[in-house]
Amino acid sequence: MPSPIARRAAMLLGMIVLLLLTGCGEKRPPLSPRGQASQLGADVMRGRQLIADYGCVACHTIEGVKGPVSRVGPPLKDMALRAYVGGVLPNTPENLVRWLLDPPAVDPRTAMPDMGMSVADAKDIAAYLLTLH
Ligand code: HEC
Protein backbone atom coordinates (compact mmCIF):
# COMPACT_ATOMS: atom_id res chain seq x y z
CA MET A 1 0.00 0.00 0.00
CA PRO A 2 1.64 3.36 -1.03
CA SER A 3 1.77 6.06 1.62
CA PRO A 4 -0.70 9.01 1.31
CA ILE A 5 2.23 11.27 0.42
CA ALA A 6 3.43 8.95 -2.33
CA ARG A 7 -0.13 8.73 -3.65
CA ARG A 8 -0.47 12.52 -3.65
CA ALA A 9 2.90 12.87 -5.40
CA ALA A 10 1.81 10.33 -8.01
CA MET A 11 -1.44 12.24 -8.54
CA LEU A 12 0.43 15.53 -8.94
CA LEU A 13 2.78 13.90 -11.42
CA GLY A 14 -0.22 12.54 -13.31
CA MET A 15 -1.75 15.99 -13.52
CA ILE A 16 1.48 17.48 -14.84
CA VAL A 17 1.74 14.76 -17.48
CA LEU A 18 -1.89 15.37 -18.47
CA LEU A 19 -1.24 19.10 -18.81
CA LEU A 20 1.81 18.40 -20.95
CA LEU A 21 -0.15 15.95 -23.11
CA THR A 22 -3.02 18.37 -23.70
CA GLY A 23 -0.35 20.92 -24.60
CA CYS A 24 -1.67 23.89 -22.67
CA GLY A 25 -1.22 27.00 -24.81
CA GLU A 26 0.32 25.08 -27.70
CA LYS A 27 -0.91 26.29 -31.09
CA ARG A 28 -1.95 23.49 -33.41
CA PRO A 29 -1.81 24.16 -37.13
CA PRO A 30 -5.33 24.70 -38.51
CA LEU A 31 -6.83 21.90 -40.61
CA SER A 32 -7.71 24.23 -43.46
CA PRO A 33 -6.06 27.34 -44.91
CA ARG A 34 -9.16 29.52 -44.64
CA GLY A 35 -8.14 33.17 -44.36
CA GLN A 36 -4.48 32.44 -45.13
CA ALA A 37 -4.47 33.31 -48.84
CA SER A 38 -2.91 36.70 -48.11
CA GLN A 39 0.26 34.86 -46.98
CA LEU A 40 1.03 34.37 -50.66
CA GLY A 41 1.05 38.10 -51.37
CA ALA A 42 -0.60 37.21 -54.67
CA ASP A 43 -3.13 38.75 -57.05
CA VAL A 44 -6.46 36.97 -56.65
CA MET A 45 -8.16 38.42 -59.74
CA ARG A 46 -5.13 37.69 -61.93
CA GLY A 47 -5.32 34.14 -60.57
CA ARG A 48 -8.91 33.82 -61.70
CA GLN A 49 -7.99 35.02 -65.19
CA LEU A 50 -5.01 32.61 -65.29
CA ILE A 51 -7.29 29.69 -64.45
CA ALA A 52 -9.28 30.54 -67.59
CA ASP A 53 -6.08 31.05 -69.65
CA TYR A 54 -4.53 27.73 -68.59
CA GLY A 55 -7.74 25.91 -69.44
CA CYS A 56 -8.12 24.27 -66.03
CA VAL A 57 -11.87 24.17 -66.78
CA ALA A 58 -11.21 21.42 -69.32
CA CYS A 59 -10.91 19.09 -66.32
CA HIS A 60 -12.38 20.99 -63.37
CA THR A 61 -15.63 22.77 -62.72
CA ILE A 62 -14.40 25.85 -60.88
CA GLU A 63 -16.52 28.20 -58.86
CA GLY A 64 -16.46 31.71 -60.36
CA VAL A 65 -14.80 30.65 -63.64
CA LYS A 66 -16.90 30.08 -66.76
CA GLY A 67 -16.44 26.84 -68.63
CA PRO A 68 -17.97 23.50 -69.51
CA VAL A 69 -19.12 21.17 -66.77
CA SER A 70 -16.16 18.84 -66.57
CA ARG A 71 -15.70 15.98 -64.19
CA VAL A 72 -12.24 14.72 -65.15
CA GLY A 73 -10.92 16.19 -61.91
CA PRO A 74 -12.83 17.12 -58.75
CA PRO A 75 -14.89 20.33 -58.78
CA LEU A 76 -12.73 23.08 -57.29
CA LYS A 77 -14.90 24.63 -54.63
CA ASP A 78 -14.46 24.93 -50.90
CA MET A 79 -10.69 24.89 -51.47
CA ALA A 80 -10.19 27.14 -48.43
CA LEU A 81 -11.91 24.54 -46.26
CA ARG A 82 -10.18 21.38 -47.49
CA ALA A 83 -7.81 19.60 -45.16
CA TYR A 84 -5.79 18.04 -48.01
CA VAL A 85 -4.69 18.86 -51.54
CA GLY A 86 -5.01 15.91 -53.91
CA GLY A 87 -5.69 13.78 -50.85
CA VAL A 88 -1.99 13.72 -49.97
CA LEU A 89 -0.65 17.16 -48.99
CA PRO A 90 -1.90 19.12 -45.97
CA ASN A 91 -3.76 22.07 -47.50
CA THR A 92 -1.62 25.13 -46.78
CA PRO A 93 -1.07 28.05 -49.20
CA GLU A 94 2.52 26.87 -49.83
CA ASN A 95 1.45 23.27 -50.44
CA LEU A 96 -1.29 24.33 -52.83
CA VAL A 97 1.34 26.23 -54.84
CA ARG A 98 3.59 23.17 -54.73
CA TRP A 99 0.76 21.02 -56.08
CA LEU A 100 -0.05 23.44 -58.89
CA LEU A 101 3.60 23.64 -59.95
CA ASP A 102 3.99 19.90 -60.43
CA PRO A 103 1.22 17.51 -59.30
CA PRO A 104 3.02 14.30 -60.41
CA ALA A 105 6.03 15.32 -58.27
CA VAL A 106 3.68 15.28 -55.26
CA ASP A 107 1.78 12.15 -56.23
CA PRO A 108 3.23 10.12 -59.13
CA ARG A 109 -0.12 8.39 -59.69
CA THR A 110 -2.20 11.54 -60.08
CA ALA A 111 -4.04 12.15 -63.35
CA MET A 112 -3.41 15.90 -63.14
CA PRO A 113 -0.55 16.87 -65.46
CA ASP A 114 2.26 19.32 -64.82
CA MET A 115 0.77 22.47 -66.40
CA GLY A 116 4.20 24.06 -66.74
CA MET A 117 3.30 27.20 -64.83
CA SER A 118 5.57 29.76 -63.24
CA VAL A 119 5.78 30.24 -59.48
CA ALA A 120 4.13 33.66 -59.81
CA ASP A 121 1.21 32.17 -61.75
CA ALA A 122 0.85 29.30 -59.27
CA LYS A 123 0.72 31.77 -56.37
CA ASP A 124 -1.97 33.88 -58.02
CA ILE A 125 -4.02 30.79 -58.91
CA ALA A 126 -3.65 29.37 -55.40
CA ALA A 127 -4.73 32.73 -53.95
CA TYR A 128 -7.90 32.63 -56.04
CA LEU A 129 -8.65 29.01 -55.12
CA LEU A 130 -8.23 29.89 -51.45
CA THR A 131 -11.04 32.44 -51.69
CA LEU A 132 -13.46 29.56 -52.35
CA HIS A 133 -15.33 28.47 -49.25
C1 HEC B 1 -6.06 16.90 -67.64
C2 HEC B 1 -6.97 17.22 -66.59
C3 HEC B 1 -6.57 18.31 -65.62
C4 HEC B 1 -6.19 19.60 -65.87
C5 HEC B 1 -5.98 20.27 -67.21
C6 HEC B 1 -6.04 20.24 -64.58
N1 HEC B 1 -6.30 19.36 -63.58
FE1 HEC B 1 -6.31 19.77 -61.60
N2 HEC B 1 -6.70 17.83 -61.19
C7 HEC B 1 -6.99 16.87 -62.14
C8 HEC B 1 -7.27 15.61 -61.47
C9 HEC B 1 -7.62 14.30 -62.13
C10 HEC B 1 -7.16 15.88 -60.08
C11 HEC B 1 -7.33 14.91 -58.92
C12 HEC B 1 -5.94 14.53 -58.57
C13 HEC B 1 -5.75 13.64 -57.41
O1 HEC B 1 -6.52 13.75 -56.44
O2 HEC B 1 -4.79 12.89 -57.47
C14 HEC B 1 -6.80 17.29 -59.95
C15 HEC B 1 -6.61 17.93 -58.75
C16 HEC B 1 -6.46 19.28 -58.60
C17 HEC B 1 -6.41 19.98 -57.35
C18 HEC B 1 -6.52 19.33 -55.99
C19 HEC B 1 -8.00 19.21 -55.71
C20 HEC B 1 -8.36 18.53 -54.43
O3 HEC B 1 -9.54 18.19 -54.32
O4 HEC B 1 -7.51 18.30 -53.58
C21 HEC B 1 -6.29 21.30 -57.61
C22 HEC B 1 -6.21 22.43 -56.63
C23 HEC B 1 -6.24 21.44 -59.05
N3 HEC B 1 -6.35 20.18 -59.61
C24 HEC B 1 -6.12 22.63 -59.71
C25 HEC B 1 -5.96 22.73 -61.09
C26 HEC B 1 -5.70 23.99 -61.76
C27 HEC B 1 -5.64 25.34 -61.09
C28 HEC B 1 -5.55 23.68 -63.08
C29 HEC B 1 -5.17 24.61 -64.17
C30 HEC B 1 -3.93 25.31 -64.04
C31 HEC B 1 -5.74 22.25 -63.22
N4 HEC B 1 -6.00 21.71 -61.99
C32 HEC B 1 -5.70 21.58 -64.43
C33 HEC B 1 -7.00 17.02 -63.49
C34 HEC B 1 -6.64 18.16 -64.17
Image (cartoon, grey):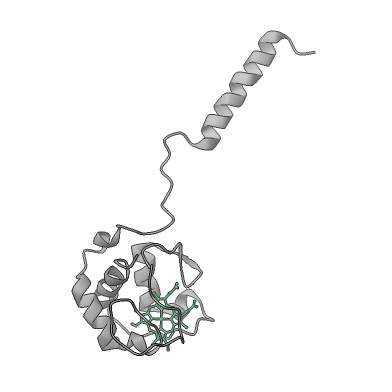
Residue name at image x 37 percent, y 90 percent? 58
Location of residue 13 (image quadrant) = top right
> Where does the image place residue 79, in percent across and percent down from the top left?
38, 68
Residue 28 lies, with reference to residue 81, above or below; the image says above
> Where does the image place residue 124, in percent across and percent down from the top left?
25, 73
Residue name at image x 49 percent, y 36 percent? 23
Residue 25 lies, with reference to residue 68, above or below; the image says above
Residue name at image x 68 percent, y 13 percent? 6
Is the N terminus in the top left, top right, bottom left or bottom right quadrant? top right
Quarter of the rendered image showing ligand 1: bottom left
Residue 19 lies, with reference to residue 36, above or below; the image says above
Q: Nearer the viewer, residue 72 or 26?
A: 72
Q: Nearer the viewer, residue 65 or 47?
A: 65
Location of residue 122 (image quadrant) = bottom left
Is the C terminus in the top left, top right, bottom left or bottom right quadrant? bottom left
Location of residue 95 (image quadrant) = bottom left
Q: Nearer the viewer, residue 98 or 25?
A: 25
72 relative position to 13: left or right: left
> Where does the image place residue 69, in percent across and percent down from the top left?
39, 87
> Where does the image place residue 99, in percent across and percent down from the top left?
40, 74
